[in-house]
Image (spheres, coloured by chain):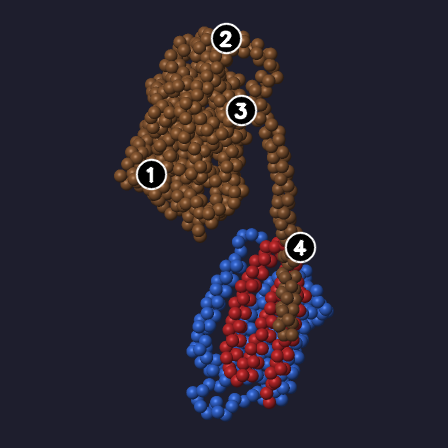
Chain colours: A red, B blue, C brown
């Protein structure tokens, strides 16, 4: 029995929504980063579901590349977070308002 | 049968997402996200993308999330606890462990979609979703993105090293 | 000789102006005066050659001998053609010879007069002088109204530049401005007339235009023609200093004396007369316009003559005298005797330039003194100057056989013959006034007893060769120049009249011209006698009043105190203009200036303020906090998706 496409899409949408909500709600920059990863995962799921729906296996490749990019982004992003932490001593995103005005 | 497994795994994924949203301790958030990753790997399995599921566990859950955990634990102090609803003492990691067990059980007990007859017969063809198929596609049709991805990883590597160097400033 | 060569006549002085004005610094050791005189000499030489060339030509179908050539098709827009072309017919030839000839003499004189200026200023002076020659030649040699106007404006500009040559002196700068602005007022009339002419007759090139004038289909009505002619004349009143735009000429005496001689006596001020003569076919079609010209000319002659009676500055006397004589020339044009007007221009150029240069010699010798009341008995110290000055004065007053007699007399005779007896009467009266103030001038300056301090008298030295040579040449011309126009009454041909007759033939035809030959010679001799008598009366009256020191004039002044004051103050014309015209204009200008400040600056500031306000509003969104940015992104995305999907 196959998994219907709509189910996958609903799951993906819910996960993405959770990711957005988490991003807007939380103040800890690392947690915000993690919510971005969650969003990326949701997108991955969408791609795989659609690819399977069309009978292609290219979805796997796209998802693979997205994972790669997500890895790179996580590495660099976390390096930046550490630098900022060293500079400001806080992980509260609301306190980084140098660009105000 | 697969549908039921799918529903359970979906519930686990959503649970992990909620945990990410509501946990006050960043470590708890990270662990919840690991649960989500694992659940999604299971979903890929139900969809027939075995290779991707393996990669998801290995890379995403096994490397990226570990990196996040490293960083979280590096700056883990009580004052960095965020707002949220979970009780602070909730032992999230244990819960995650339990849920992971559920995950494994579910996956092992289900019949994953079998590859089609036609694909098995012809040994030139690779099974869709399998590693062979992915490899074939990656090194023929998607060679350019593959190379580009390696460049991105290189750049990220260098960038991360450069950025995290201490410059003597506090 | 190819006529294109004559393009050099105006071109060479232009090159000289450029050399002196722009490149002088790079050409070390070149004397500006030398360059300037050289260029004008070349022009003069070419003019003489052109003159003989012209004499040798065959007359065309109108009987006019003319050289016409186009150098360059300047403006071709629709039906409007303004080529860069030249026309040398007897009329322009006359002016060209005067401008280059007298101009050359004045250039030579300037070398001596301006010797004490530093070399950089001299370069500027000679550059402007050459530029003036160029402009004046363009004015008279152009074959269409636009080129004439080009020269017209050019001479106005050079006049301004040269009057305010000593620009560090406030009154010189102010005089230059006054000249330029008053000129400009006249120019409005000129431009309007040009445009109207084109609109009515379809062309501004002279041969074509005059051909179209004779076309009855194009006749726009007498009123239109009169208006066009009067508008042209307005320009002439500005340029040639007639009532009401003469006020700039006396002030223009602030410039160096050679400038006064060249521009304000011999050439620029005669541009108006040239223009009227050139447009004579047009003027001939409107008797009303001609009457106006004659009346204005006569009134100016008289008015300026009266003012000149009591002026104390030697140059101002000559300035008012110039205005007066210009009035005579317009009088001549007004009664249809255009050739007589041109003749008087020629003789006037000779003797007025002579008088100005002579006064320059006096001022130079006296180290800057210009008040004749403070002079006297200069005959002993400056005998040569006295002789030439006397010659010029006799010519100005119109004493036979000097040049001025023949030209002035021809004008008066033409007036009489035309039936304008009142104008004739006033003209004769003005001649008497001319004689009076001329004698007064000569006597107070050169004769009688000295009213100068003895130490000043000792320092007087005669003028250098560069200055005296032109003086003698001009004196000679003043003496014999009359030969050009000896009337037929004496049994000889009127050389100038015959030369110019073909040019004015169509005008005379329009007016149903009376030839001079049509009237009896005895009438002419009688009128000559009357004017001579008036002249001598003027001399005698002047001698009686000023002959023995200043007591009699002073007593007369006290006796007629109010009248004396009015005349001595030039009838308060400048003051009247200042109150009636200049002050309201200044008030209006200030009003609009303030309005500009309020309105336009307000608009600009308002725009800036609006942008500023908008910026303040937008700044609300720039919190610097990532989360708020994320919120707005999400909100925007949702809205966009919603819009796309519904």
In terms of sequence position, does the residue under pointer 4 or pointer 1 come before the other? Answer: 1
Same chain? Circles 4 and 1: yes
Q: Nearer the viewer, mark 3 or mark 4?
A: 3
Res. C549 mark: 2
Chain letter for mark 2, please: C
Q: Position of residue C525 (x, y in %)?
A: 41, 21
Lower position in the chain sequence, tag 1 or tag 3: 1
C560 and C32: which is toward the camera: C560
Confirm or deny contact between disc 4 and disc 1 (CB under 8 A): no
The Cα atoms of the two marked residues, 3 and 4, are separated by: 73 Å
Along the line of sight, which residue is nearer the eye, C565 or C37? Answer: C565
Q: Residue at x 59, y 70 (%)?
A: A37
- Relative image position of residue C129 (x, y in whole percent): 40, 30
Is disc 1 in contact with disc 3, using a CB cutoff of under 8 Å?
no
* Label 1: which secondary element: loop
Q: CA distance from mark 3 to mark 2?
A: 27 Å
Task: Check the residue under mark 4 and report the chain it is in.
Answer: C
- Can residue C19 be seen here? The reply is no
What residue is shown at x 48% (from left), y 67% (from top)?
B152
Residue nearer the viewer, B167 or C308: C308
The earlier-in-sequence mark between 4 and 2 is 2
Q: Is residue B127 above or below residue C478?
A: below
Cα distance between the residues tagged 4 and 2: 89 Å
Are labels 1 and 2 on one chain? yes
| Mark 3 residue element | helix
Do tags 3 and 4 sit on the same chain?
A: yes
Q: Is residue C413 above or below residue A36?
A: above
Name the residue tied to disc 4. Answer: C617
First in sequence: mark 1 vs mark 2 = 1
Residue designated by label 1? C65
């Amino acid at each position: 029995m196959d998994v219907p496409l709509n189910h996958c899409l609903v799951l993906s949408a819910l996960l993405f929504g959770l990711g957005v909500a988490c991003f807007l709600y939380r103040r800890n920059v690392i947690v915000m980063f993690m919510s971005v990863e969650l969003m990326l995962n949701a997108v991955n799921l969408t791609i795989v579901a659609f690819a399977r729906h069309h009978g292609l296996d290219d979805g796997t490749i796209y998802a693979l590349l997205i994972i790669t990019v997500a890895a790179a982004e996580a590495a660099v992003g976390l390096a930046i977070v550490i630098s900022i932490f060293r500079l400001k001593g806080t992980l509260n995103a609301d306190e980084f308002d140098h660009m105000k005005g | 049968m697969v549908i039921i497994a799918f529903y359970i795994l979906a519930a686990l994924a959503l649970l992990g997402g909620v945990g990410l949203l509501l946990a006050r301790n960043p470590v708890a958030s990270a662990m919840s996200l690991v649960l989500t990753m694992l659940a999604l790997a299971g979903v890929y399995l139900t969809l027939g993308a075995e290779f991707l599921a393996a990669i998801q566990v290995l890379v995403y859950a096994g490397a990226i999330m570990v990196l996040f955990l490293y960083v979280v634990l590096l700056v883990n102090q009580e004052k960095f606890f965020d707002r949220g609803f979970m009780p602070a003492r909730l032992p999230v990691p244990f819960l995650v462990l339990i849920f992971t067990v559920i995950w494994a059980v579910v996956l092992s007990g289900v019949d994953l979609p079998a590859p089609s007859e036609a694909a098995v017969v012809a040994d030139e063809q690779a099974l869709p979703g399998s590693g062979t198929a992915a490899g074939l596609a990656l090194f023929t049709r998607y060679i350019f993105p593959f190379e580009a991805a390696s460049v991105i990883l290189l750049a990220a590597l260098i960038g991360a090293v450069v950025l995290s160097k201490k410059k003597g400033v506090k | 000789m190819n006529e294109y060569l004559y393009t050099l006549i105006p071109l060479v002085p232009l090159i000289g102006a450029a050399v002196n004005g722009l490149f002088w610094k790079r050409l070390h050791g070149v004397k500006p005066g030398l360059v300037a005189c050289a260029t004008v000499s070349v022009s003069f030489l070419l003019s003489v050659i052109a003159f003989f060339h012209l004499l040798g030509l065959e007359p065309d179908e109108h009987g006019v001998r003319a050289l016409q050539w186009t150098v360059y098709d300047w403006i071709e827009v629709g039906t409007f053609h303004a080529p860069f072309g030249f026309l040398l017919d007897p009329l322009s030839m006359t002016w060209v010879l005067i401008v280059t000839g007298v101009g050359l003499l004045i250039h030579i004189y300037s070398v001596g007069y301006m010797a004490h200026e530093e070399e950089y200023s001299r370069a500027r002076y000679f550059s402007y002088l050459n530029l003036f020659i160029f402009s004046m030649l363009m004015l008279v040699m152009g074959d269409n109204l636009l080129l004439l106007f080009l020269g017209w404006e050019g001479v106005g500009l050079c006049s301004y530049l040269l009057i305010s040559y000593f620009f560090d002196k406030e009154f010189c700068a102010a005089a230059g401005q006054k000249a330029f602005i008053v000129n400009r007022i006249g120019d409005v009339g000129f431009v309007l007339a040009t445009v109207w002419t084109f609109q009515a007759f379809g062309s501004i090139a002279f041969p074509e235009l005059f051909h179209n004038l004779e076309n009855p289909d194009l006749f726009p009505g007498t009123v239109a023609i009169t208006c066009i002619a009067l508008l042209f004349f307005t320009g002439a009143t500005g340029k040639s200093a007639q009532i009401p735009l003469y006020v700039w000429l006396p002030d223009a005496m602030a410039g160096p004396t050679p400038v006064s001689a060249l521009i304000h006596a011999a050439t620029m001020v005669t541009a108006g007369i040239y223009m009227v003569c050139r447009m004579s076919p047009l003027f001939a079609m409107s008797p009303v316009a001609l009457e106006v010209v004659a009346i204005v000319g006569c009134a100016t002659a008289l008015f300026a003559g009266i003012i000149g009676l009591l002026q104390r500055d030697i140059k101002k006397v000559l300035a008012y005298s110039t205005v007066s004589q210009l009035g005579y020339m317009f009088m001549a044009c007004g009664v249809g005797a255009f050739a007589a007007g041109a003749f008087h221009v020629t003789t006037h150029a000779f003797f007025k330039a002579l008088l100005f240069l002579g006064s320059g010699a006096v001022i130079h010798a006296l180290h800057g003194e210009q008040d004749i009341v403070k002079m006297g008995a200069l005959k002993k110290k400056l005998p040569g100057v006295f002789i030439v000055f006397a010659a010029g004065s006799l010519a100005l007053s119109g004493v036979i056989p000097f040049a001025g007699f023949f030209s002035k007399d021809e004008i008066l005779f033409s007036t009489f013959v035309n039936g304008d007896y009142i104008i004739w009467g006033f003209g004769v009266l003005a001649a008497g006034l001319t004689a009076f103030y001329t004698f007064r001038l000569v006597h107070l300056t050169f004769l009688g007893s000295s009213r100068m301090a003895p130490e000043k008298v000792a320092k007087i030295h005669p003028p250098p060769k560069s200055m005296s040579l032109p003086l003698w040449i001009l004196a000679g011309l003043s003496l014999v120049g009359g030969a050009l126009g000896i009337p037929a009454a004496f049994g000889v041909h009127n050389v100038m009249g015959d030369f110019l007759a073909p040019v004015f033939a169509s005008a005379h035809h329009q007016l149903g011209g009376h030839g001079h030959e049509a009237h009896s010679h005895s009438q002419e001799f009688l009128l000559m006698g009357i004017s001579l008598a008036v002249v001598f009366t003027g001399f005698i009256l002047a001698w009686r009043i000023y002959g023995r020191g200043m007591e009699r004039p002073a007593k007369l002044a006290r006796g007629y105190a109010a009248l004396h004051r009015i005349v001595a103050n030039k009838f308060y014309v400048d003051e009247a203009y200042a109150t009636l015209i200049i002050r309201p204009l200044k008030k209006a200008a200030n009003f609009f200036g303030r309005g500009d400040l309020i309105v336009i600056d307000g608009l600009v500031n308002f725009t800036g303020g609006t942008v500023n306000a908008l910026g303040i509003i937008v700044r609300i969104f720039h919190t610097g906090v990532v989360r708020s940015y994320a919120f707005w992104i999400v909100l925007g995305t949702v809205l966009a998706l919603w819009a796309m999907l519904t």
